[in-house]
Image (cartoon, rainbow, N blue to C red):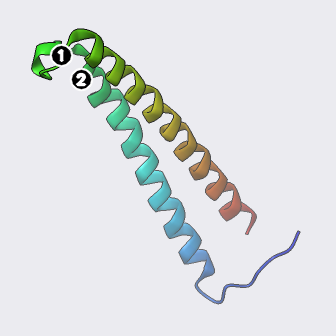
Amino acid sequence: MIMIWLGRGHAALMTLACLVLGLLAGGMLVIGVAFVSFWKSLSPSDFGLSDSAVRSLLDRSATWHWIRTGLGMVGFIAALRALQRS
């Protein structure tokens, strides 16, 4: 394993990076649980579009949101493992 010395503050920077990644991933999780389910509960007339257009748009957006949330969680776990090994 190759270790790169980042100077005296490397542990603080890695900890800060983990904190930021955790907050962002947690924020995406809250958005997915709270807002996506709320948007799906609204009627299509609230959006001003037809029923099929709204459902298609919401389903596509929800799918991509959960993919981004999963990738954010994977990044957060990878950062924690890197911090643990340093």
* Nearer to me, 76 or 46: 46
Q: Image quarter for residue 65?
A: top left
User: Residue 37's image quarter?
Assistant: top left
Disc 2 and disc 1 in contact, CB within 8 angstroms: yes
- The residue lying furthest to the right in this view is 1
Picture residue at 46% right of the left edge, 46% below the top: 25
Q: Amino acid at mark 1?
A: Leu
Local secondary structure at mark 2: helix
Q: Closer to the camera, 52 or 58?
A: 52
Which residue is at a point 42% across and 52% down the rendered structure image? 24
As drawn, is 65 to the left or to the right of 14? left
User: Which numbered tag is attached to residue 42?
Assistant: 1
Residue under numbered circle 2: 39
Question: Seen in the image, is 31 located left or right of residue 14?
Answer: left
The correct choice, above or below, for 22 with respect to 68 in the image is below
Which amino acid type corresponds to the residue marked 2 in the rendered image?
Trp
Q: Residue at x 81, y 76 (%)?
A: 3
- Say which quadrant the C terminus sits in: bottom right
Residue at figure coordinates x 60%, y 51% from the top left = 75
Foreground pick, 36 / 57: 57
Mark 2 and mark 1: Cα distance apart in space: 5 Å
How many numbered discs, if any?
A: 2
Q: Classify mark 1: residues with Cα within 10 Å, few (<14), some (14-19) or many (20+).
A: few
Percent across and percent down for residue 4 are: 76, 80
Looking at the image, residue 64 lies above or below residue 85 = above
In the rendered image, which quarter contains the N terminus?
Answer: bottom right
Relative image position of residue 84 (x, y in whole percent): 69, 61
